[in-house]
């Protein structure tokens, strides 16, 4: 697990992340959308003693009932039998629970989190039974703690728990030569993942990338290089290839090249690589493993397309909402 970057801000952030990874204290990662907050949270978990335990993300921006989804709830069926539906805290076990967009968590739920972190226990909704909380808590915010407190989005009592354990991630436009390093990294990554011939960027392409403002930060750069890897057969990509995307003229070029390489062909190419790596060895449960790997990005993209509306996503995917909810939990997309 690595965090790419050599700018002074990133070096400082990674050093602090490595230091915080050694303990179990709660901490918060602050930065704009797309700067890599989730990736840094993964980095902290991967470098901690909890590495072998689960890492679970919980995005408050996508939850209508965060209290129940975090703490679980007790429900009674029609004949009076009670059953407990566990939440994200229980699912994280002794691993790490990363709560994204903490400022969108209702203040009463934030108060519950304060008690849970301080006392190490919590009660599911409508339950009288207390459960132990053994996970480590990481959080993300879009702005500094004091700004969220002033705007009434963050409880001072909760902020106090991790105020000294705050990591700031700068926007990509402030990271200088990191754009160069990240672009090369993402292009290598996508070519290898998709089974494509290795591609490189010219000096002119790097210059263009450094000049661009990156309103959506690292996430935007990563997607740009994915489209570039898929859309052009050339092994050396120049500035004019990338300018198509930046100017908003990507669609026609993308469709042209996607016609030449079908989705089925791309999947077959990747599976062939995988089977070659297996060699003479036999493994069990291959079908289920492959289906999960294909199903996860499909469901993820449909959820993004629908703004995380599970009802619409289920309709698009051709499954009922309960089935989709089960798959979202199984594939760790919630």
Image (spheres, rainbow, N blue to C red):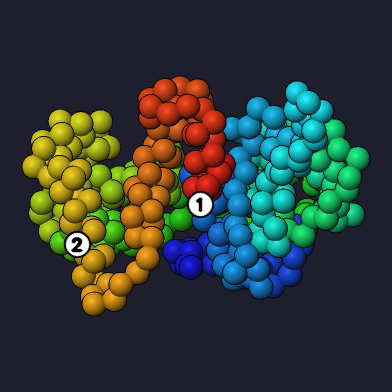
As rendered, which of 110 and 209 lies closer to the eye?
110
Dividing the picture into quarters, in which one does residue 74 lie?
Answer: top right
- Helix, strand or loop for disc 1: loop
Residue extending farthest to the front is: 79
Q: Is residue 167 above or below residue 304?
A: below
- Between the residue at mark 2 and the residue at mark 1, the CA separation in whole angstroms equals 32 Å
- Helix, strand or loop for disc 2: helix
Dividing the picture into quarters, in which one does residue 301 lie?
Answer: top left
Q: Nearer the viewer, mark 2 or mark 1?
A: 2
Q: Residue at position x 77%, y 60% from top? A: 134
Dividing the picture into quarters, in which one does residue 20 lie?
Answer: bottom right
- Horizontal side of residue 333 vs 256, given as left or right: right
Image spot of residue 27 (x, y percent) = 71, 56
- Horizontal side of residue 82 vs 89, given as left or right: right
Mark 1 lies on residue: 36
Residue 94 can be seen in this image: yes
Residue 306 can be seen in this image: no
Residue extending farthest to the bottom is: 280
Image spot of residue 123 (x, y percent) = 85, 43
Crowding at label 2, few (<14), some or many (≥20) Cα neighbours within 10 Å? few
Q: Residue at position x 46%, y 55% from top? A: 175
Image spot of residue 31 (x, y percent) = 58, 46
Crowding at label 1, few (<14), some or many (≥20) Cα neighbours within 10 Å? many
Mark 2 lies on residue: 272
| Quarter of the image where the C terminus is located | top right
Q: Residue at position x 28%, y 50% from top? A: 225
């Amino acid at each position: 697990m690595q965090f790419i970057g050599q700018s002074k801000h990133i070096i400082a952030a990674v050093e602090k992340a490595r230091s915080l990874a050694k303990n179990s204290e709660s901490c918060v990662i602050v930065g704009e959308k797309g700067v890599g907050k989730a990736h840094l949270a993964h980095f902290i978990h991967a470098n901690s003693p909890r590495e072998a335990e689960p890492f679970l993300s919980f995005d408050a921006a996508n939850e209508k009932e965060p209290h129940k989804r975090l703490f679980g709830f007790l429900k009674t069926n029609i004949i009076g039998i009670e059953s407990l539906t566990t939440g994200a805290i229980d699912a994280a076990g002794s691993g790490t629970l990363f709560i994204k967009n903490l400022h969108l968590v209702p203040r009463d739920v934030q108060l519950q989190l304060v008690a849970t972190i301080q006392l190490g226990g919590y009660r599911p909704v409508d339950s009288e039974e207390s459960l132990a909380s053994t996970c480590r808590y990481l959080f993300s915010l879009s702005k500094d703690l004091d700004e969220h407190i002033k705007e009434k989005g963050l409880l001072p009592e909760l902020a106090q728990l991790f105020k000294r354990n705050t990591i700031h991630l700068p926007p990509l436009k402030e990271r200088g030569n990191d754009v160069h390093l990240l672009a090369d990294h993402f292009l290598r990554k996508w070519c290898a993942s998709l089974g494509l011939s290795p591609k490189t960027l010219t000096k002119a392409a790097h210059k263009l990338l450094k000049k661009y403002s990156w309103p959506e930060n690292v996430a935007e750069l990563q997607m740009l290089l994915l489209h570039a890897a898929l859309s052009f057969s050339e092994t050396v990509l120049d500035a004019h290839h990338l300018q198509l995307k930046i100017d908003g003229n990507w669609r026609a070029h993308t469709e042209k090249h996607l016609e030449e390489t079908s989705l089925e062909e791309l999947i077959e190419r990747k599976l062939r690589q995988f089977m070659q790596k297996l060699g003479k060895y036999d493994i069990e449960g291959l079908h289920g493993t492959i289906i999960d790997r294909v199903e996860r990005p499909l469901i993820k993209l449909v959820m993004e397309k629908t703004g995380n509306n599970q009802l619409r996503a289920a309709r698009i995917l051709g499954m009922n909402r309960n089935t989709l909810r089960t798959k979202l939990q199984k594939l760790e997309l919630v």
